[in-house]
């Protein structure tokens, strides 16, 4: 119920102003929760669609398994034919989803635990991690 309507009805019912404000505040909290859940759903779907639409994520992991791999955004960008900005965005997502790890000495390594990495297995795991992360945040 809109806060304005709560105020109008509260006056008609003879409620004290503080009581009306308390009821209006409850309504705002409920709206805030709904907005927060909507925001979380938007983040979750954005992450999932990025994983599905941008093969750079699994390509970076595949590249990280090669012996000649260097943990350098410019190197990865050149190898994959993308910009360093795209590499940095994908790197951030892979780290956030615990699909790639970066050690204190700057080494990037695959953290999927998958014995064989292909696009299908990567997508399954990545989407599961996106869902897990969304569930943790939404509580």
Image (cartoon, rainbow, N blue to C red):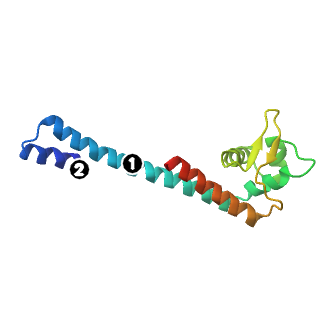
Which residue is pictured at 68% across the width and 44% down the height? 92
Residue 120 visible, this orientation: yes
* Disc 2: which residue: 2
Could you tell me residue 72's position as x and y percent?
Answer: 82, 40
Which residue is pictured at 55% across the width and 52% down the height? 134
Residue 81 visible, this orientation: no
Could you tell me residue 63's position as x and y percent?
Answer: 84, 53
* Disc 1: which residue: 33
Which residue is pictured at 77% across the width and 49% down the height? 111
Asked which secondary structure carries label 1, the reply is helix
Instruction: Using a 10 Å C-alpha cutoff, classify the residue at mark 1 as few (fewer than 14 neighbours), some (14 to 19) or many (20 or more).
Output: few
Image quarter of residue 10 = top left
In front: mark 1 or mark 2?
1
In this picture, residue 126 sits left or right of residue 28: right
Asked which secondary structure carries label 2, the reply is loop
Which residue is pictured at 81% across the width and 43% down the height? 108
Q: Which residue lies furthest to the top in this view?
A: 105
Nearer to us in this view, 98 or 62: 98
Instruction: Using a 10 Å C-alpha cutoff, classify the residue at mark 2 as few (fewer than 14 neighbours), some (14 to 19) or many (20 or more).
Output: few
Count how many numbered circles sit on residues in the image: 2
Say the numbered circle drawn on residue 73.
Answer: none
Could you tell me residue 116's position as x and y percent?
Answer: 83, 62
Separation (CA) of disc 1 from disc 2: 15 Å
Earlier residue among tags 1 and 2: 2
């Amino acid at each position: 119920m809109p806060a304005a309507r709560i105020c109008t009805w509260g006056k008609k019912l003879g409620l004290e102003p503080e009581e009306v404000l308390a009821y209006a505040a409850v309504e705002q909290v409920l709206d805030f929760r709904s907005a927060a859940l909507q925001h979380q759903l938007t983040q979750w779907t954005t992450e999932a669609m990025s994983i599905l639409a941008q093969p750079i994520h699994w390509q970076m992991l595949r590249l990280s398994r090669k012996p000649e791999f260097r943990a350098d955004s410019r190197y990865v960008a050149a190898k994959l034919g993308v910009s360093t900005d795209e590499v940095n965005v994908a790197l951030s997502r892979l780290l956030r989803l615990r699909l790639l790890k970066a050690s204190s000495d700057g080494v990037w390594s695959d953290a999927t635990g998958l014995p064989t990495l292909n696009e299908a297995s990567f997508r399954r795991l990545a989407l599961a991690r996106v869902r897990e992360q969304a569930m943790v945040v939404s509580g």
